[in-house]
Image: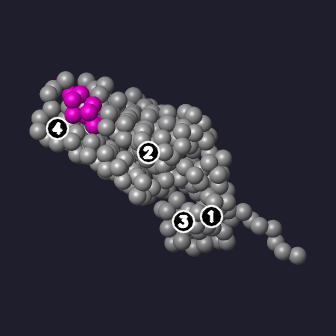
Amino acid sequence: MTDPDPGPGAAAVVGPGRLAAGLVRACHPGPTAAVTALVTALAVASGRDVGGCVLAGAAVLAGQLSIGWCNDAIDAGRDAAAGRAGKPVASGAVSVRAVWIAAVVALACCVPLSLASGWWAGGLHLVGVLAAWGYDVGLKATVLSWAPYAVGFGVLPAFVTLGLPGELWPAWWAVAAAALLGVGAHLANVLPDIAGDLDSGVRGWPQRMGAARVRLLVPVPLLAATCLLVFGPAGAAAGVAGWLAVAAASALAAMGLLLAARSARVPFVTAVAVAGVDVILLVAGGASLTA
């Protein structure tokens, strides 16, 4: 008689070193580090003092950790069924229980860290974090899967500027560009996994459109964000640097479309590159983020 299968994430007791390594891998370290770095850089560029920049970075880090761990805990069964050995929960490197505990603790830490920047700033950041949890919990499989990304990214400029003295609201173009950047990130992130998602029953907005349409759509919100960041501030005419940014983003988007037939990863890589241009523009315009 054999023991019953304990299921995904039900690994034997592991040492603290292996547990820590598993938790790091389960938090989606790349996006977590990228978003934390982005907001910290925005805080510096907008003129927040050292303490304000540290608090903003810590709040975003806690929120992103909670989102990543929540995602891996919820998806453990689906990842195991799909044979995704790179996922630490699905492979048994860390238990679902441990990841859930870490997610809840990180979310609890995110609350006071966010509110330390002020009620408005902190409240809006928490709205973005909860929107991302909503994506993990169920919205990812609906036609509204784009909305948590738009909200989660869109509130970041407000979180930064409302933490400044006088609680200044961000300019509309900064909020719109950040929201579009979020939608583009959603499309680019899902694109390589659309076939596997459909097999596992996940039918979000991109999955319903199909990979071919998503490849065509990915550059649209990202290029729209580029144009807003170049032409939005005070309606000013773009300088040489602005036009170069638009040209670079357009060339990258065109490359992704033209080379899509050669490799399914090319549109994803070029979309990330366009998003990188947008991030540089957003940070470079940090001093003019306020309305």
Return the residue at label 4.
Answer: 243
The alpha-carbon separation of the residues under discs 4 and 1 comes to 45 Å
Quarter where residue 242 is shown: top left
The kind of secondary structure element at disc 3 is: loop
**Mark in front: 4 vs 2:** 2
The alpha-carbon separation of the residues under discs 4 and 2 comes to 25 Å
Residues packed near mark 4 inside 10 Å, few (<14), some (14 to 19) or many (20 plus): some
- The residue sitting at 84% across, 74% down in the picture is 2
Nearer to the camera, 179 or 184: 184
Return the residue at label 3.
Answer: 86
Q: In which quarter of the image is the N terminus?
A: bottom right
**Mark in front: 4 vs 3:** 4
Residue type of the residue flagged with mark 1 = Gly
| Residue 279 appears left or right of 113 | left
Residue type of the residue flagged with mark 4 = Trp
Nearer to the camera, 277 or 123: 277
Q: Do the residues labelled 4 and 3 touch (CB within 8 Å)?
A: no
- Looking at the image, tell me whether mark 4 or mark 3 is earlier in sequence order: 3
- Looking at the image, tell me whether mark 1 or mark 2 is earlier in sequence order: 1
- Looking at the image, tell me whether mark 4 or mark 1 is earlier in sequence order: 1
Return the residue at label 2.
Answer: 215
- Looking at the image, tell me whether mark 4 or mark 2 is earlier in sequence order: 2
Which region of the structure is painted magenta?
225-234
The answer to whether residue 125 is magenta is no
- The residue sitting at 42% across, 39% down in the picture is 217
Return the residue at label 1.
Answer: 83
Tell me residue 86's x, y (percent): 54, 65
